[in-house]
């Protein structure tokens, strides 16, 4: 039936108006962006500067304020490709196992003899025993340290492989545990990098894993790759150690089970510390800028229940002993424990500036990177280049739109005008939907929009040609229009479903620019089917009801 029910008309018009309303803020991009930044600042700090207050007042709060985020290639920004040092995690794991292994083997000292740690690669722990004839017994005891791997692929396997040869026990991670450790390390690194980037107030960063040990980081709007490296490249690894001694010789042998680290604020001073930390920054739950008893900048911290209990027990048992706070391999403070510190909170003092205390608190809150990173690739995209890309995209979209509209009007007359109006609504709905979901527009995304402009009228072409065919069979105008839409529907659905599936595959399997293209392609398919079938049909129906033509000129 040519007539469209009222409820369908309301839905069609409502969706079109919603799309136009959501897309409208993009016409005032700088003003709305400044308004959104001011609102975010107000939510974060509870106060606004005069400039921020003016920016917030520059766009009414009752109007939509969602924007299409611009990608790195359009806004400018920084691009980094980082390699995570997974071997460092293996070494930390072996260092953590050594005290437990020493304890269980020491219980068998009467049988296996003296136990000591031997030099070994980063991913292995080698332990020498005094009685080589009991190596089998030593391996049996060491295997009690292993536990089942908690992954689907590691069912039935233990996390440690323990072997013995001569007088040496070798402990290493099993292949399944090594794979699980790699995944955990990469996921933790991704999350911490994301926290640090988000805390800096950047817009729509792209942070994803690439390959086995690499992370791609793209942050639009940031000044340079060096600035981004400074933000995320610091490991910020905080540990608390027992102090064995101190001196001025950087080449002094710290002794078995100890490490020699320099003081951060005093040249020539070195501390000998127990290699195994009492607690680590992984057990922190909060860190914030504060001041010490003298009013100097400091960082206050708080542990989780496990860390608080360990920290409290240690301070209770070691009153009067120095306690070193180590950050990224340097002793930033070594206060003497004056009393039992209960509650799991404390303060880090040092020669900090206000900014340094603020930055340190930020890094500690975000968490320590589980391993260091090497930046294999870094690139800065200037805002001028991004603006050039936007201008080129506008020209391409404008030329494509003019060409398509000209062809449709020349080929189908008034019906071509209807299709052209629907095409404009279609473009607005693409931007409106991307604004609603907070989508990111990239240069390949612009290519997807240009492609949508070219293909969006395909459905109208199929419908109009089918109407022409029905008119040749002496059908009346109303019947011809009705049959045109009915008979073209299957071809329209088939063509767009196959393209939609292709877009989904590109989005799922692709990365970076490919995904940017896939997003606009998928959205464009959905909106073009809606506008080509329902919006043009609504316009044709309204025109026909008003004019009641005896024939159609197509």
Image (tube, rainbow, N blue to C red):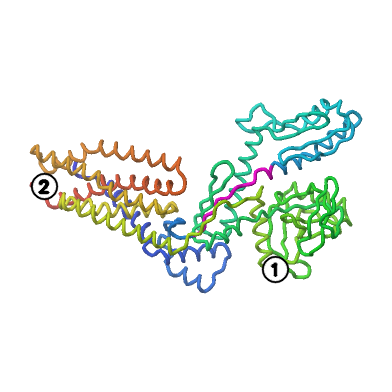
Q: Is residue 75 left or right of residue 91?
A: left
Counting from the top left corner in percent of width and height, residue 173 is at 70, 35
Counting from the top left corner in percent of width and height, residue 510 is at 45, 43
CA separation in Å, label 2 and label 1 = 80 Å
Identify residue for label 2: 552
Tally of numbered discs: 2
Which residue is pictured at 20% across the width and 54% down the height? 406
Q: Earlier in the sequence, mark 2 or mark 1?
A: 1
Q: Which residues are magenta?
A: 77-89
387 or 359, which is in the foreground? 387
Q: Report if residue 66 is visible in the image.
A: no
Residue 85 in magenta stretch: yes
414 or 254, which is in the foreground? 254
Counting from the top left corner in percent of width and height, residue 296 is at 74, 69
How packed is label 1: few (under 14 Cα within 10 Å), some, or many (20 or more)?
few
344 or 272, which is in the foreground? 272
Identify residue for label 1: 353
Residue 437 in magenta stretch: no
Counting from the top left corner in percent of width and height, residue 190 is at 58, 48
Which SS type dominates the magenta stretch?
strand
Judged from the image, the secondary structure of the residue bearing numbered disc 2 is loop
Judged from the image, the secondary structure of the residue bearing numbered disc 1 is loop
């Amino acid at each position: 039936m040519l007539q469209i029910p009222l409820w369908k008309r309301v839905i069609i018009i409502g969706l079109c108006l919603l799309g136009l309303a959501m897309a409208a803020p993009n016409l005032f991009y700088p003003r709305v962006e400044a308004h959104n930044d001011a609102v975010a600042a107000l939510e974060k700090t509870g106060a606004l500067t005069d400039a921020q207050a003016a920016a917030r007042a520059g766009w009414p709060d009752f109007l939509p304020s969602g924007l299409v985020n611009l990608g790195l290639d359009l806004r400018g920004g920084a691009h980094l490709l980082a390699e995570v040092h997974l071997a460092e995690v293996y070494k930390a794991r072996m260092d953590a196992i050594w005290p437990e292994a020493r304890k269980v083997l020491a219980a068998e000292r009467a049988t296996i003899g003296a136990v000591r740690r031997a030099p070994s690669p980063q991913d292995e722990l080698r332990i020498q025993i005094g009685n080589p004839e009991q190596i089998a017994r030593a391996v049996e005891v060491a295997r009690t340290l292993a536990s089942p791997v908690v992954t689907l692929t590691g069912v039935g396997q233990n996390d440690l492989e323990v072997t013995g040869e001569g007088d040496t026990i070798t402990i290493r991670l099993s292949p399944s545990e090594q794979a699980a450790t790699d995944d955990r390390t990469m996921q933790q690194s991704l999350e911490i990098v994301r926290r640090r980037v988000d805390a800096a107030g950047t817009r729509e960063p792209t942070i994803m894993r690439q390959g086995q040990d690499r992370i791609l980081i793209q942050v639009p709007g940031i000044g340079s790759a060096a600035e981004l490296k400074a933000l995320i490249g610091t490991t910020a690894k905080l540990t608390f150690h027992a102090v064995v001694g101190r001196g001025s010789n950087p080449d002094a042998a710290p002794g078995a089970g100890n490490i020699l680290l320099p003081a951060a604020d005093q040249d020539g001073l070195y501390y000998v510390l127990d290699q195994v930390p009492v607690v680590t920054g992984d057990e922190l739950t909060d860190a914030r800028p504060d001041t010490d008893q003298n009013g100097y900048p400091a960082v206050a911290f708080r542990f989780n229940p496990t860390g608080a209990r360990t920290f409290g027990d240690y301070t209770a048992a070691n009153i009067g002993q120095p306690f070193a706070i180590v950050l990224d391999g340097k002793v930033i403070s070594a206060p003497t424990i004056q009393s039992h510190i209960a509650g799991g909170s404390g303060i880090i003092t040092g020669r900090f500036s206000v900014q340094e205390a603020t930055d340190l608190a930020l890094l500690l809150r975000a968490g320590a990177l589980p391993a260091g990173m090497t930046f294999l690739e870094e690139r800065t995209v200037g805002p001028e280049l991004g603006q050039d890309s936007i201008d080129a995209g506008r020209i391409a979209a404008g030329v494509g739109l003019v060409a398509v509209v000209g062809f449709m009007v020349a080929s189908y007359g008034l019906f071509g005008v209807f299709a052209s109006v629907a095409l404009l609504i279609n473009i607005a709905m693409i931007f409106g939907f991307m604004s609603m979901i907070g989508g990111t527009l990239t240069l390949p995304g612009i290519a997807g929009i240009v492609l949508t402009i070219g293909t969006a009228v395909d459905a109208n072409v199929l419908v109009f040609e089918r109407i022409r065919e029905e008119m040749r069979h002496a059908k009346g105008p109303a019947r011809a229009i009705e049959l045109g839409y009915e008979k073209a529907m299957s071809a329209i659905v088939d063509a767009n479903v196959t393209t939609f599936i292709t877009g989904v595959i590109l989005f799922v399997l692709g990365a970076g620019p490919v995904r940017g293209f896939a997003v606009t392609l998928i959205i464009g398919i959905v909106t073009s089917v809606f506008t080509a079938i329902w919006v043009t049909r609504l316009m044709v129906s309204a025109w026909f009801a008003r004019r009641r033509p005896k024939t159609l000129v197509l």
